[in-house]
């Protein structure tokens, strides 16, 4: 990857070119891309604008390339940096209100020797963290002051380790130097930003004839993800015309952002603890072109849907796997979310220092999630193209940590904390939904000849688990 880049469309173009080359795609296609916008919109010391524009641009350009390889138009792609940054805010409204992104007890807390971040958006993670702190019983009895007092007896990394041993999601705040010195950072440093690996032999898969203006028309995508990165991948593929079927478990919790990330998808439920419903998923997989999963390490394999098993069920399939900390190293099986990876790897410490604060500070958007989601959509399409040219079954891997390492490699922005957060309300569009009246920031990229999708957003279980 190139060194530090300026935060403008020129820097994003160079960065996107590197992404395109890493995927093994022909460089001439990049000429279709028109990038606009200069200077960061969001207050941060990192090149969030470059990251947003390059990853969204790569996904949109890949859609144009897929279209041309299927006999469709070789359409130009237009993308403004500030529109890309707005999309990465994840801003949406339900019934005129903006849902909170965080549960009351989620957040950054001081402890004996530093800070820890606790992710409590899911009740079982919240209750587990409270129990570890000796705050058992009804969670509604406790507020953040109670958590601060209980953490006063803990060192940050000790609490992080104890939480990980219980399957909870907590991160100690580190500096970049402290993270780099650890064994997992050293192992993960050997990984590329993403990988596209051939995992089996198969002839080129027959793709349905695409309709003009819909690059991914007829391409079937199974989306087995729930938090931001994976669902963003599915939403982007749906925006380019794919038939995306979201599969949720009736027993699994979701976050409010599911209303936003479900746009353009159909939404079904299967309880994969039941053999009969696993058989239904297998039937769906045999008709899919892309299978997207974000299970904990080994979780999907235990259910019978490892990438290798899927390649046997459906020769030629493209499987996408998302993880928090990557496939190798001592933290490879550790659970994590964007906010926690930011904290653990040094971003919050660095951002706080850049802003002149004496405590860690989060990035203004969950860029690791959104960057990973757009890269997953890009990787899926790149693998589909390679499948059509080379045959084979393919496995695409992306992790939040790999995205973090890449974002860090883009360099820093000086003196960028004086601006206010951008106005987003007037940028929203209306979408059909049975979650409520939904308004959301639309997809930032514009592909010529493609009418932007205004697909609806539907609650889990609205649709049957069958292909349209």
Image: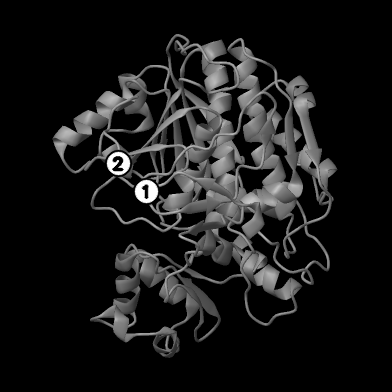
Asked if residue 43 is positioned above or below residue 307 in the image, the reply reads below
Asked if residue 225 is positioned above or below residue 383 in the image, the reply reads below
Q: Residue at x 40, y 54 (%)?
A: 436
Q: Quadrant of the N terminus?
A: top right
Count residues near mark 2 (Cα–Cα under 10 Å), then give few for <14, some for 14-19, many for 20+: few
Q: Which of 80 and 224 lies nearest the eye of the viewer?
A: 80
Please, what secondary structure does the residue beneath circle 2 have? loop
Q: Which residue has dot 1 on it?
A: 434
x and y, in percent, of residue 166 in the image: 31, 66
Q: Residue at x 70, y 80 (%)?
A: 357
Work out whether mark 2 precedes mark 1 in sequence or the reverse, and give the earlier one.
Answer: 1
Q: How is the image coloured?
A: one colour
x and y, in percent, of residue 156 in the image: 49, 77
x and y, in percent, of residue 302 in the image: 26, 40
> Looking at the image, how many numbered discs can be counted on the residues?
2
Tell me if 288 is positioned left or right of 175 in this view. Answer: left
x and y, in percent, of residue 463 in the image: 30, 36
Label drawn at residue 179: none
Q: Quadrant of the C terminus?
A: top left
Tell me if 468 is positioned left or right of 28 in this view. Answer: left
Label 2 and label 1: CA atoms lie apart by 9 Å
Q: Which residue has dot 2 on it?
A: 462
- Can you tell which quarter of the image residue 143 is in? bottom left
Mark 2–mark 1 contact, CB under 8 Å? Answer: yes
């Amino acid at each position: 990857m190139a060194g530090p880049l300026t935060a403008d469309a020129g820097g994003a173009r160079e960065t996107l070119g590197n992404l395109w080359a890493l995927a093994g795609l022909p460089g001439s296609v990049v000429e279709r891309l028109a990038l606009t916008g200069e200077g960061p919109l969001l207050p941060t010391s990192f090149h969030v604008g470059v990251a947003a524009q390059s990853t969204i641009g790569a996904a949109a350009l890949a859609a144009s390339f897929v279209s041309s390889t299927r006999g469709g138009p070789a359409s130009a792609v237009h993308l403004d940096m500030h529109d890309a940054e707005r999309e990465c805010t994840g801003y949406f409204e339900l019934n005129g209100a903006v849902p909170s992104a965080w549960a009351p007890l989620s957040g950054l807390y001081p402890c004996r020797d530093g800070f820890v971040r606790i992710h409590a958006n899911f009740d079982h993670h919240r209750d587990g963290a409270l129990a570890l702190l000796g705050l058992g019983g009804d969670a509604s009895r406790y507020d953040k002051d109670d958590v601060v007092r209980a953490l006063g007896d803990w060192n940050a990394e000790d609490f992080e380790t104890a939480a990980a041993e219980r399957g909870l999601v907590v991160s100690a705040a580190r500096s970049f130097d402290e993270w780099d010195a650890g064994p997992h950072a050293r192992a993960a440093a050997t990984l590329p930003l993403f990988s596209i690996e051939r995992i089996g032999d198969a002839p080129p898969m027959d793709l349905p004839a695409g309709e003009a203006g819909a690059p991914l028309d007829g391409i079937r995508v199974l989306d087995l993800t729930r938090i931001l990165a994976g669902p963003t991948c599915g939403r982007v593929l749906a925006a380019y015309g794919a038939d995306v079927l979201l599969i949720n478990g009736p027993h699994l919790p979701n976050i409010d952002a599911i209303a936003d990330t479900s746009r353009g998808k159909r939404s079904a439920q299967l309880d994969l603890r039941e053999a009969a419903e696993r058989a239904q998923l297998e039937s769906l997989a045999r008709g899919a072109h892309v299978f997207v999963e974000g299970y904990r390490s080994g979780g999907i394999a235990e259910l019978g849907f490892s990438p290798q098993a899927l390649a046997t069920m459906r020769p030629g399939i493209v499987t996408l796997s998302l993880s928090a900390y990557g496939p190798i190293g001592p933290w490879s099986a550790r659970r994590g979310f964007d906010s926690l990876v930011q904290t653990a790897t040094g971003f919050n410490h660095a951002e706080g220092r850049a802003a002149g604060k004496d405590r860690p500070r989060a990035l203004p958007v969950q860029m690791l999630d959104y960057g990973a989601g757009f890269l997953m959509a890009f990787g899926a399409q790149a693998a589909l193209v390679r499948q059509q040219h080379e045959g084979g079954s393919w496995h695409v891997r992306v992790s939040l940590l790999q995205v973090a390492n890449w974002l860090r490699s883009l360099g820093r922005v000086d003196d960028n904390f004086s601006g206010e957060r951008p106005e987003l309300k007037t940028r929203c569009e209306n979408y059909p939904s049975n979650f409520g009246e939904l308004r959301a920031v639309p997809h930032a990229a514009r592909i010529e000849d493609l009418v932007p999708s205004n697909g609806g957003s539907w609650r889990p279980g609205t649709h049957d688990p069958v292909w349209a």
